Image (tube, rainbow, N blue to C red):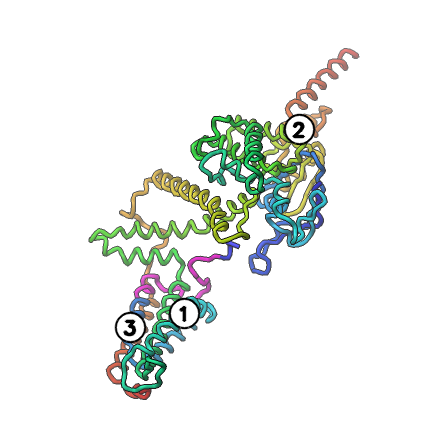
């Protein structure tokens, strides 16, 4: 689905301020996967995702999405942006229209759809993100922060991308708002077979909903594997300034104390099951004695 | 694309000119400009050229930068020169085209006009090239302070200037981000008719204004919270202090003034042009 081959990107080439943001990145992301992208500030995450819909063109290397080479200078940018939807950090800052409806309709209108199609898409998008129809005629500047963010995400969803990239969609939201947004994203992935790439700082979030994780460090891919595998490298992750989820931390602690638990566990549910299993085994063992 | 915009043209090198007190620099540039209008003959301009040349050399700003400042005014300079050439009345006729007469007096005024403009721009560029925008506002504030007695809000004006300067890079970054976000929603800024392209700016300008107002609001609240209330009894981290070199610079400019007055009083061989 998405293929990055030897992608490098250098900011301000040819000036004394030259700095490499991406360094020989090779990735293959399958269709219908949910990938988490983590890395500390300045690791190249944001630069990487801007390459996925050709907002940035790599200094060298190739990016192929669904068989189309988007690094080709003659590529139809509108097609690329229709295919890959990108939700920026704090997307509510890009709202500008008079009404919520018009703002969500901005993307589809740019695609050249008819009024009927646009309407259909707007209604579909608000249904997905959970905005009530009664809000459509309100000004996007009059609604609450969480609602604004949903409107902004709906604006990208209304373009019906087959790949959805979100840059920290939960930043600055309260826990309830965060859970809701993450639920909606997971729902999208499951209901519409959307390929999702989620950039996040929060290990907990990524562990909970992603099935693969890309770890970026200094413009390189440090790890790219299933969630289980990546979180089993706690030592290395810590070295590049990242943490594993707290439950994984607990499991590692237990292991250190001599309990035979799986240290790759990264969700509370799995941890609970594992600890119960431990007690069960212990009981069995005692009984056998 | 937007990263190429630089405001204030400060050229960061170390030179005796960079080290001067901004207040002294501002006053000296004023003196320089006023003096420029008193020059009446070629000897005076020669002195000016020599002085400006030496100062540029001292400032260690490459000549290329100085000339770049002249470029946008090239058209105006040519325009004034042509206007002067034909409009100035005189006795010594050089040539006639149709009803227009070019005189030697006109030529003289035209050349003087160009020289005046060139020195004017070079003098002011030297100020902005060797002084950081912040030092400049500090200097202006300090110079305007005496006018507070007649109700001029000197500190507030300077504060507004520094805040504006400080937010330029922030807003540029913001603009870039918004442009990308709208491009991701299929906006197209590069193709289409002029009207279409102007319309494409609306989705950028509105969020930009909204965020600028939000930032202004936040900054105002943050300043209130720290009990900011204008310039009364405020001390500053970097006090402006006069040094020996400021005195030296003032003496040099005073010498220049003296020389110009001398050339005006005794127009030695300055009549050779006519």
Chain identity of mark 2: A
Using the rendered view, name the quadrant where residue A199 is placed. Answer: top right
- Tell me: A16 left or right of B270: right
Q: Pick the residue in front: A226 or A236.
A: A226
Disc 3 and disc 2 in contact, CB within 8 angstroms: no
Check disc 3 and report the residue beneath it: B35
Which chain letter goes with mark 1?
A: B
Q: Which residue is mark 2?
A: A190
The secondary structure type at the circle numbered 3 is helix
Q: Residue at x 34, y 56 (%)?
A: B138
Q: Quadrant of the N terminus of chain A?
A: top right
Disc 1 target residue: B75
**C-alpha distance separating marks 3 and 2:** 78 Å
Label 3 resides on the chain identified as B
Q: Position of residue A241 (x, y in %)?
A: 61, 40
Nearest to the eye among marks 2 and 1: give it. 1
Query: Which residue is painted at 65% across and 37% down in the image?
Result: A162
Q: Which residues are magenta?
A: B5-27
Q: Secondary structure at mark 1?
A: helix
Please name the residue shown 32% across and 42% down the image. B228
Q: Residue B12 in magenta? A: yes
Which of the image's four quarters has the C terminus of chain A? Answer: top right
Judge whether residue B210 is colored magenta.
Answer: no
């Amino acid at each position: 689905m998405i293929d990055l081959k030897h992608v490098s990107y250098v900011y301000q080439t040819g000036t004394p301020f030259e700095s490499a943001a991406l360094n020989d990145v090779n990735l293959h992301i399958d269709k219908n996967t949910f990938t988490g992208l983590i890395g500390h500030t300045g690791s190249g995450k944001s630069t990487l995702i801007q390459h996925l819909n050709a907002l940035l063109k790599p200094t060298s290397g190739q990016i192929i999405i669904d068989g189309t080479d988007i690094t080709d200078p003659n590529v139809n940018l509108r097609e690329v942006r229709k295919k890959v939807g990108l939700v920026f950090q704090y997307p509510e800052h890009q709202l500008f229209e008079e009404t919520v409806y018009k703002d969500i309709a901005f993307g589809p209108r740019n695609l050249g759809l008819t009024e009927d199609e646009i309407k259909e898409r707007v209604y579909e998008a608000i249904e997905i993100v959970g905005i009530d129809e009664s809000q459509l005629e309100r000004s996007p500047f009059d609604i609450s922060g969480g609602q604004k963010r949903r409107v902004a995400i709906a604006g990208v969803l209304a373009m019906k991308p087959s790949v959805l990239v979100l840059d920290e969609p939960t930043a600055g939201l309260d826990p309830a708002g965060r859970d809701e947004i993450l639920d909606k994203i997971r729902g999208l992935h499951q209901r519409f077979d959307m390929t999702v790439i989620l950039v996040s700082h929060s290990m907990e979030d990524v562990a909970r909903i992603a099935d693969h994780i890309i770890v970026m460090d200094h413009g390189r891919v440090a790890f790219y594997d299933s969630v289980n595998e990546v979180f089993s490298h706690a030592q290395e992750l810590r070295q590049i300034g990242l943490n594993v989820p707290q439950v994984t931390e607990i499991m590692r602690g237990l292991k250190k104390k001599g309990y035979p638990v799986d240290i790759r566990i990264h969700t509370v549910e799995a941890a609970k099951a594992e600890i119960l299993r431990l007690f069960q085994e212990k009981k069995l063992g005692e009984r056998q004695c | 694309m937007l990263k190429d915009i630089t405001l204030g043209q400060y050229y960061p090198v170390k030179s005796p000119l960079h080290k001067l007190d901004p207040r002294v620099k501002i006053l000296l540039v004023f003196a320089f400009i006023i003096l420029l209008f008193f020059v009446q003959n070629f000897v005076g301009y020669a002195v000016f050229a020599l002085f400006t040349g030496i100062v540029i050399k001292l400032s260690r700003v490459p000549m290329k930068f100085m000339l770049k400042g002249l470029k946008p005014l090239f058209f105006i300079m040519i325009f004034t020169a042509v206007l002067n050439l034909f409009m100035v009345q005189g006795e010594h006729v050089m040539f006639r085209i149709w009803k227009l007469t070019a005189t030697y007096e006109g030529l003289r005024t035209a050349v003087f006009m160009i020289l005046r403009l060139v020195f004017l721009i070079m003098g002011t560029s030297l100020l902005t090239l060797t002084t950081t925008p912040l030092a400049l506002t500090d200097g202006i504030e300090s110079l305007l302070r005496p006018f507070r007695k007649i109700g001029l809000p000197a500190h507030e004006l300077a504060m507004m200037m520094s805040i504006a300067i400080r937010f330029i890079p922030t807003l540029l970054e913001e603009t870039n981000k918004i442009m990308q976000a709208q491009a991701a929603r299929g906006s197209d800024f590069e193709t289409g008719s002029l009207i279409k392209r102007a319309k494409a700016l609306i989705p950028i300008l509105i969020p930009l204004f909204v965020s600028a107002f939000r930032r202004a609001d936040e900054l105002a609240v943050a300043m209130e919270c720290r009990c900011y209330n204008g310039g009364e009894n405020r001390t500053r981290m970097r006090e402006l202090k006069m040094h020996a070199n400021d005195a030296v610079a003032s003496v040099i400019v005073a010498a220049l003034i003296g020389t110009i007055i001398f050339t005006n009083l005794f127009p030695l061989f300055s009549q050779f042009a006519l």
